[in-house]
Image (tube, coloured by chain):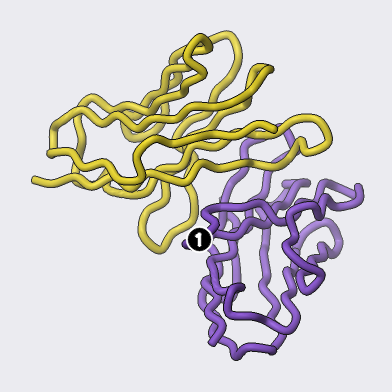
Amino acid sequence: GAGVSQSPSNKVTEKGKDVELRCDPISGHTALYWYRQSLGQGLEFLIYFQGNSAPDKSGLPSDRFSAERTGGSVSTLTIQRTQQEDSAVYLCASSRGLQETQYFGPGTRLLVL
Amino acid sequence: AQSVTQLGSHVSVSEGALVLLRCNYSSSVPPYLFWYVQYPNQGLQLLLKYTSAATLFKGINGFEAEFKKSETSFHLTKPSAHMSDAAEYFCAVRLGGTSYGKLTFGQGTILTVHP
């Protein structure tokens, strides 16, 4: 079946602009996660959604970052007023539940100029 | 807090040689441990995961990992390296308590395989 998909695959933006990154989880997966992979910080957790529960936002680095998940499926990660330090690969993952294996998408490579 | 440490950011082996990638965890309770592989410009792919009631876990592509509680280790091995194994490997632990869904990753080990 189809895996986790993310779009765009690459995004170049100017400092100060807003960007939206999209994630389409595997059908039927109730949990969805966002991670960030950067040279300086490695792989770090950002946020996860599980069913209708309130999301765990504890990994979001600042209030410029937000995410939503509509209809329990697609999720959008929004970064407002982008900074150069936001340049990274943003990875999305999904799982059947919080205790289940997380399957990752190919990522969105964000470059802030 | 639970964490994982990967010893060696780069490992280089000859084709056909043993691969050993090290991972140690810090945890006072049985952890949920994973190994993921990342090929260039791709996402993470699950290699194998720890499940209770066993100590040796076999994954894809001939990799396996042994859970040693006394050493708090979950090292990844493969008896004979292949050129296609060249990638970055991440050890990860799933947190518990109120952070149940999060994965915490090690810093990664880049594996180079030379002819």
Q: Give the residue at mark 1.
A: A40
User: Which quadrant of the structure image shows residue A34?
Assistant: bottom right
Q: Which chain is purple?
A: A
Q: Residue at x 73, y 84 (%)?
A: A81
Q: Circle 1 — which element?
A: loop
Residue B111 image point, x, y percent: 29, 44
Q: Is residue A42 left or right of residue A46?
A: left
Q: Looking at the image, is A86 positioned above or below residue B35?
A: below
Q: Chain of mark 1?
A: A
User: Which quadrant of the structure image shows residue A47?
Assistant: bottom right
The amino acid sitting under disc 1 is Gly
User: Which quadrant of the structure image shows residue A97?
Assistant: top right
Residue A57 image point, x, y percent: 81, 55
Q: Is residue B46 left or right of residue A68?
A: left
Q: Which chain is yellow?
A: B
Residue B53 image point, x, y percent: 58, 8
Q: Looking at the image, is A94 positioned above or below residue B71?
A: below
Q: Residue at x 54, y 27 (%)?
A: B25
